[in-house]
């Protein structure tokens, strides 16, 4: 029976910003044998430009997430280890930048054809399966916090969260001293042949519509998907286009 493998590609651009503050990495993508034994990691971190040195924050997070992945014991609870890795990277960012810098993170690992993820902030993780698109993670912003609080209070009116002027403000991020919530998997999601995963910063996920994302992920190869992502982002011609970073992974046999 043929083994499932994973083709991966990436794209990154500066947008209209003065500097690039996103960082990304993938590990074990060139060696199928090693990726089967130890897993495939891919991660996107978006440094927060309104705080101190977003690039340092995102690079520091990437460094520690990769280091922890390389020391991971795949015979133990992978989901718990992945979340702990993100907490530890947050502590390193907080220590290095003295609580004055921050970054988002979407961290993904594929092991034994199962997807694990851990995310914090407003970077995105999408799965395209057939003609359907799913956002797998939840953004940590004021809008979603207000939604959750309204549900807990029995108020199901979404309008206050939609019209609040700070609806996109992050409530959790790496480097935040009060980091208490990381979204993530509890058990692996089994991946199927033809599945496409997209991990991206909000310069992609916050710009492209669901239909646009489905369209760009419909190309046959990840490299073509990445080129289409960049074309689609730039076609919006946003005056304040953020840095944009995307990693695409396609499951093939």
Image (cartoon, rainbow, N blue to C red):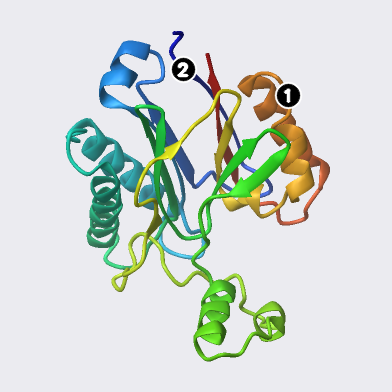
Q: Earlier in the sequence, mark 1 or mark 2?
A: 2
Q: Is residue 94 above or below residue 39?
A: below
Q: Position of residue 141 (x, y in %)?
A: 53, 70
Specify few, some or many for label 2: CA neighbours under 10 Å numbering under 14, 14-19, or 20 or more: some
Residue 233 shows up from this direction: no
Residue drawn where x is 73% and y is 33% of the image: 216
Q: Nearer the viewer, residue 239 or 226?
A: 226
Q: Which of labels 1 and 2 is toward the front?
A: 2
* Residue lying at the far front of the rendered structure: 1
Q: Position of residue 21 (x, y in %)?
A: 49, 47
Query: Secondary structure under badge 2?
Result: loop
Q: Which mark is residue 4?
A: 2
Q: Position of residue 162 (x, y in %)?
A: 70, 78
Residue drawn where x is 64% and y is 37% of the image: 128
Figure label count: 2
Residue 47 lies left or right of residue 211; in this view the side is: left
Residue 41 lies left or right of residue 98; in this view the side is: right
Residue 209 lies left or right of residue 11; in this view the side is: right
- Return the residue at label 1: 219
Q: Nearer the viewer, residue 50 or 233?
A: 233
Q: Is residue 95 above or below residue 107?
A: below
Q: Nearer the viewer, residue 195 or 118?
A: 195
Residue 119 lies left or right of residue 198; in this view the side is: left
Q: Quadrant of the N terminus?
A: top left
Q: Position of residue 42 (x, y in %)?
A: 42, 34
Query: Secondary structure under badge 1?
Result: loop
Q: Is residue 197 above or below residue 16?
A: above
The CA span between labels 1 and 2 is 19 Å
Q: Are marks 1 and 2 in contact (CB under 8 Å)?
A: no
Residue drawn where x is 27% and y is 57% of the image: 87
Residue 120 shows up from this direction: yes
Specify few, some or many for label 1: CA neighbours under 10 Å numbering under 14, 14-19, or 20 or more: some
């Amino acid at each position: 029976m043929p083994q499932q493998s994973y083709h991966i590609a990436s794209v990154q651009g500066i947008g209209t910003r003065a500097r690039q503050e996103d960082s990304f990495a993938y590990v074990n993508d060139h060696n199928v044998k090693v990726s089967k034994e130890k897993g495939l990691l891919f991660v996107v971190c978006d440094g927060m430009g309104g705080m101190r040195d977003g690039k340092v924050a995102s690079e520091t997070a990437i460094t520690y997430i990769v280091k922890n992945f390389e020391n991971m014991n795949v015979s133990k609870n992978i989901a718990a280890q992945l979340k702990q890795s993100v907490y530890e990277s947050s502590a390193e960012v907080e220590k290095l930048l003295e609580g004055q810098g921050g970054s988002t993170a979407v961290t993904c690992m594929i092991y034994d054809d199962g997807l694990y993820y851990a995310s914090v902030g407003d970077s995105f993780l999408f799965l395209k399966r057939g003609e359907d698109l799913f956002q797998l993670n939840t953004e940590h912003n004021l809008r979603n916090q207000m939604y959750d609080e309204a549900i807990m209070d029995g108020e199901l009116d979404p309008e206050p969260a939609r019209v609040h002027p700070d609806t996109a403000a992050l409530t959790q991020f790496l480097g935040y001293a009060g980091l208490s919530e990381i979204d993530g998997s509890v058990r692996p999601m089994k991946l199927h042949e033809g599945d496409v995963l997209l991990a991206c910063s909000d310069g992609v996920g916050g710009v492209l519509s669901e239909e646009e994302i489905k369209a760009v992920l419909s190309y046959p190869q990840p490299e073509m998907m990445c080129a289409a992502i960049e074309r689609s982002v730039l076609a919006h011609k946003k005056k304040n286009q953020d840095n944009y970073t995307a990693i695409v992974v396609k499951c093939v046999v």
